[in-house]
Image (tube, rainbow, N blue to C red):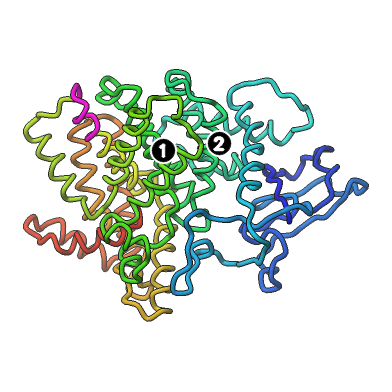
């Protein structure tokens, strides 16, 4: 087997540390981490380069790194994804991969052990613990930059893509651990630090990072947005520590083990998950159950009374299930009624839980409300995932899902429809509930981003404006648009 030691980015002017040069192997870098290892000849053209060395070779001192860097020794393995099952010739583990590599039988426990160990050093740095080994120069450099970013984790323009690069693809673990510590939840709930770290590592690994959109970076982005909402005055003054813990856990796990296709795809292919959950909130139920499985596997709440840990699992499920876009109108109508009647009392646990549900729904689809540089990247990623599903449906002669046909849709048209029928109504009501600077900032970015996409697709802008000017417009069209994209984004 082969074992991957993951390293931080290597700057051009930084010598390779001696503790790295003592290993026999190779450093390779590429535009895609899936190209690591022994690539197919057809993939060689996509690789940026590779440098091999051993302990006696001191020439590999400077490396220009453009992607992931990994050191390979002769004790490795091929990664395995939890809950990834092939159907119709589609393997969710490689559904969005540009390259497939053959490997030996997976060894998940060994992989997780080394992954866990790989994160221990970084966690010490984030907590300000003294460095035990002065040779880890790169870890100091990049963890230091990541730590500086975390000081501004509550700002709305937080660049999760940059943070993910600085943490070497471990943004979800770094960010969530920092927030749990910042809120004092680890100490308050007497959580075992080792169990917390192991839980977060397993969660991050159970996201399919081959997915362009539904991956661990998206989960980290939603978690950061949830943190911003939890800091809003109305929530900060009323939410309990238990509410905050639930909100963060739900954000971290809300898309756990997402296969990269939407619910209609699973239903029309008679996937076993659709049968298991009777075609109802299929993905959301799977995300919830997967999260519960990891909570129990790591025994994160084993020190609590059984009734309390079961209560956490149930309420976590209630939050995750609220992200089902097919129930968007139900939650939005209820939210609007509460605001019209001004009867939301955050002193009641049920009302606080409902507000947490709405906050998670906002965090899940907040990409159009981010600054353009971030929003545009997310739009391109989610549309790439849509179109890839459409290509799979074409290949197997299935009915192409709405918004998934690359020949009939563009990124601009997909985003304009999504903003008009799904995002704007939700965030308008959230701004009524929490009329703060953050809410106005989000609505401002939403308007600017919509105008930018409209400028790229003039035909769509006309129909979008027409839809906005007709209050009595039937709900069937928004629902059909929301079903496909929302099922993907939640």
Measure the alpha-carbon separation of dots 1 and 2. Answer: 18 Å
Kindly identify the residue that appears in the image at 36 percent across and 47 percent down.
Answer: 367
Kindly identify the residue that appears in the image at 62 percent across and 38 percent down.
Answer: 116
Residue 452: image x %, image y %?
34, 55
Disc 1 element: helix
Left or right: 334 with respect to 15? left
Left or right: 478 with respect to 410? left
- Residue projecting furthest to the right: 56
The earlier-in-sequence mark between 1 and 2 is 2
- The mark closer to the camera, 1 or 2, is 2
Kindly identify the residue that appears in the image at 39 percent across and 62 percent down.
Answer: 261
Count the marks: how many?
Answer: 2
In the image, residue 54 sits, relative to residue 338, either above or below, namely: below
Taking depth in this image into account, of 478 and 326 the one nearest to the observer is: 326
Residue 28 falls in image quadrant: bottom right
In the image, residue 243 sits, relative to residue 158, either above or below, namely: above
Which portion, as a residue range, is magenta? 346-354
Residue 174: image x %, image y %?
54, 35
Q: Which residue is mark 2?
A: 198
Taking depth in this image into account, of 310 and 104 the one nearest to the observer is: 310
Residue 331 falls in image quadrant: top left
The quarter in which the N terminus is drawn is bottom right
Residue 247: image x %, image y %?
35, 33
Q: Which residue is mark 1?
A: 223
């Amino acid at each position: 087997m082969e074992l991957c030691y993951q390293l931080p980015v290597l700057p051009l002017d930084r010598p390779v540390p001696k503790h790295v040069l003592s290993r026999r192997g190779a450093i390779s870098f590429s535009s895609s981490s899936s190209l690591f290892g022994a690539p197919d000849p057809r993939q060689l053209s996509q690789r940026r380069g590779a440098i091999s060395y051993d302990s006696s070779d001191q020439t590999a001192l400077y490396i220009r790194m453009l992607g992931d860097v990994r050191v390979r020794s002769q004790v490795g393995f091929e990664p395995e994804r939890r809950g990834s099952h092939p159907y119709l010739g589609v393997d969710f583990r490689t559904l969005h991969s540009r390259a497939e590599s053959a490997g030996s039988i997976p060894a998940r426990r060994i992989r997780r052990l080394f992954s866990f160990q790989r994160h221990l050093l970084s966690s010490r740095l984030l907590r300000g613990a003294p460095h035990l080994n002065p040779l880890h120069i790169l870890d100091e450099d990049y963890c230091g930059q990541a730590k500086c970013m975390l000081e501004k984790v509550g700002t709305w323009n937080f660049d999760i893509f940059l943070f993910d690069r600085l943490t070497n693809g471990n943004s979800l673990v770094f960010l969530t651990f920092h927030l749990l510590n910042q809120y004092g939840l680890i100490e308050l709930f007497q959580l075992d630090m080792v169990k917390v770290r192991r839980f977060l590592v397993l969660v991050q690994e159970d996201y399919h990072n081959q997915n362009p959109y539904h991956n661990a970076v998206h989960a980290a982005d939603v978690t950061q947005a949830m943190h911003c909402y939890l800091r809003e005055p109305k929530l900060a003054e009323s939410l309990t520590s238990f509410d905050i813990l639930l909100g963060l856990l739900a954000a971290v796990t809300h898309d756990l083990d997402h296969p990269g296709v939407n619910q209609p795809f699973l239903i029309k292919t008679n996937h076993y998950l659709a049968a298991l959950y009777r075609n109802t909130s299929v993905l959301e139920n799977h995300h919830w159950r997967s999260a519960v499985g990891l909570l129990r596997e790591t025994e994160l709440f084993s020190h609590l009374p059984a009734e309390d840990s079961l209560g956490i699992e149930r309420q976590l499920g209630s939050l995750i299930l609220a992200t089902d876009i097919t129930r968007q109108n139900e939650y939005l109508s209820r939210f609007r009624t509460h605001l019209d009647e001004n009867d939301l009392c955050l002193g009641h646990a049920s009302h606080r839980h409902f507000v947490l549900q709405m906050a998670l729904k906002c965090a899940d689809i907040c990409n159009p409300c981010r600054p353009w540089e971030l929003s545009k990247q997310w739009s391109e990623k989610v549309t790439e995932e849509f179109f890839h599903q459409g290509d799979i449906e074409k290949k197997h002669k299935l009915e192409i899902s709405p918004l998934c046909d690359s020949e009939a849709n563009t990124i601009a048209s997909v985003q304009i429809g999504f903003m008009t029928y799904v995002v704007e109504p939700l965030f308008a009501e959230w701004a009524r509930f929490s009329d703060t600077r953050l809410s106005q900032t989000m609505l401002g970015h939403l308007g600017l981003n919509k105008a930018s996409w409209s400028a790229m697709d003039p035909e769509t802008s006309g129909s979008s404006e027409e839809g906005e000017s007709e209050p009595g417009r039937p709900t069937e069209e928004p629902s059909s648009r929301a079903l496909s994209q929302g099922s993907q984004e939640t």
